[in-house]
């Protein structure tokens, strides 16, 4: 399923997406995002992938942990199959044009639009007066990330849909206010069975890097024992795998495990239900854990190897940033001209 309206034909197709280095990578990031990035790259799409460190600091990050997390996300991209010679891979802060275009978009986006962002409301909770101004403005920086490259498609998990829609609103208002057709109407690409991987202990919540308990998520660097234990302890219900997909209605935890299995094995949830119809959790959970270990162990092994060589990762990010700037810099320059800033 590809969402959103038509992209103007004047823009050549280009993919952009990003991941925040705020803690380690999870299975949600892998299935909802990275696995799809690799597929897009391998299909020959023009692809740019970013470690969005400026987004991470919208909430407090210990400086040393931020460095580790930045390299971990970079290693996660590469170990999963992103080839930095085919795609552009870099960290956001090495391309200052992101922050510059972000400012312009702060002056385009309306406060009312920001007030509707559900992720801000979730994160700020009852504490909205005390969170950083950056957290509030975050979606306009995200729009800058995307539009700085005239990206036409943004593969993301379901939780980012509203932000990509806001990106379209910002592009449309900019184009309208300045009477240009300069920024594309970017489409979110939200596909497959794992667009929203849920918390293993509470199927009503998203699996996230920052959840309270480690047992609620699978981290990309978890070893085989941990993965097996977490799936074994995952919350389920007394019924096993139903006879048909409708039997998962109203059973978020059961649905989540089926979806994870489907995404890991490149099948639809329907096919998984058909294969395991009638199986109890005692059978399904160990099979799921084996599958997850099978798919994730080679990635985590490679991530560890890459993370041991920080100089190599830093070099890849630096070279990626240079290539990113070659695209970003003329687009920012033109934006400044359109806005009337004297250069
Ligand atoms: P972040 O870092 O929270 O997540 C990175 C990507 O992983 C997806 N994802 C999930 N997908 C399915 N199930 C889950 N439980 C799950 N958790 C995370 C996210 O949807 C995302 O695709 N604002 C973004 C980062 C960003 C960005 C961008 C993305 C900044 N600029 C420009 C795209 C384009 C974020 O916080 O993602």
Image (tube, helix red, strand yellow):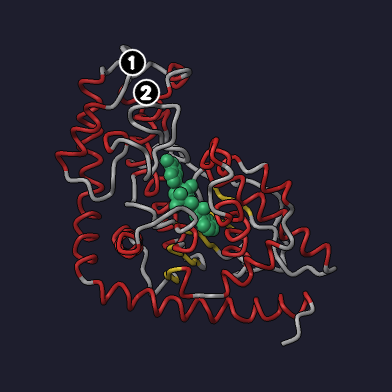
Residue at the location (73% across, 46% down)?
Answer: 112
Residue 168: where, in percent of width, then height? 69, 55
Residue lying at the far left in this picture: please name it: 225
Label 1 residue SS: loop
Judging depth in this view, the residue of 236 and 61 nearest the camera is 61
**136 to the left or right of 59:** right
Residue 131: where, in percent of width, then height? 53, 48
Residue at the location (45% across, 27% down)?
Answer: 204
Residue at the location (42% across, 54% down)?
Answer: 60
Question: Which residue carries the number 1 mark?
Answer: 237
Categorize mark 2 by other alpha carbons within 10 Å: few (<14), some (14-19), many (20+).
many
Q: Are marks 2 and 1 in contact (CB under 8 Å)?
A: yes
Q: Which sits earlier in the primary sequence, circle 2 or circle 1?
A: 1
Judging depth in this view, the residue of 271 and 229 nearest the camera is 229
Tell me, for residue 42, which label it has, or none. Answer: none
**228 to the left or right of 253:** left
Question: Which residue carries the number 2 mark?
Answer: 254
Judging depth in this view, the residue of 209 and 193 nearest the camera is 209
Picture quadrant where residue 328 is located: bottom right
Residue 197: where, in percent of width, then height? 41, 37
Label 2 residue SS: helix
Q: Quadrant of the C terminus?
A: bottom right
């Amino acid at each position: 399923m590809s969402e959103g309206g038509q992209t103007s034909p004047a823009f050549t197709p280009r993919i952009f997406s990003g991941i925040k280095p705020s803690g380690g990578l999870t299975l949600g990031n892998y299935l909802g995002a990275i696995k799809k990035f690799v597929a897009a790259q391998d299909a020959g799409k023009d692809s740019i992938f970013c470690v969005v460190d400026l987004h991470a600091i919208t909430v407090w990050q210990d400086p040393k942990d931020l460095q580790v997390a930045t390299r971990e996300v970079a290693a996660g991209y590469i170990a999963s199959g992103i080839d930095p010679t085919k795609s552009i891979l870099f960290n956001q802060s090495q391309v200052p044009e992101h922050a510059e275009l972000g400012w312009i978009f702060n002056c385009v986006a309306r406060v009312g639009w920001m007030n509707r962002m559900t992720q801000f409301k979730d994160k700020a909770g009852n504490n909205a007066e005390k969170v950083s101004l950056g957290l509030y403005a975050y979606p306009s920086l995200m729009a800058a990330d995307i539009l700085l490259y005239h990206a036409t498609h943004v593969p993301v998990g379901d939780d980012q849909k509203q932000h990509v829609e806001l990106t379209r609103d910002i592009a449309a208002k900019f184009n309208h206010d300045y009477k240009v057709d300069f920024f594309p109407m970017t489409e979110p690409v939200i596909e497959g069975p794992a667009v929203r991987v849920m918390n293993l202990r509470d199927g009503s919540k998203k699996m996230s890097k920052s959840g309270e308990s480690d047992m609620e998520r699978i981290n990309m660097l978890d070893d085989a024992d941990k993965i097996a234990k977490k799936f074994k302890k995952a919350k389920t219900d007394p019924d096993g795998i139903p006879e048909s997909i409708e039997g998962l209605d109203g059973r978020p935890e059961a649905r989540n495990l089926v979806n994870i299995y489907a995404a890991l094995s490149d099948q639809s949830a329907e096919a998984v239900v058909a294969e395991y119809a009638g199986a109890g959790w005692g059978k399904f959970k160990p099979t799921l854990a084996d599958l997850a270990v099978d798919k994730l162990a080679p990635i985590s092994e490679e991530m560890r190897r890459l993370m041991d060589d920080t100089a190599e990762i830093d070099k890849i990010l630096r070279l990626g940033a240079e290539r990113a700037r070659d695209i970003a810099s003329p687009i920012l320059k033109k934006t400044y001209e359109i806005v009337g800033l004297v250069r």
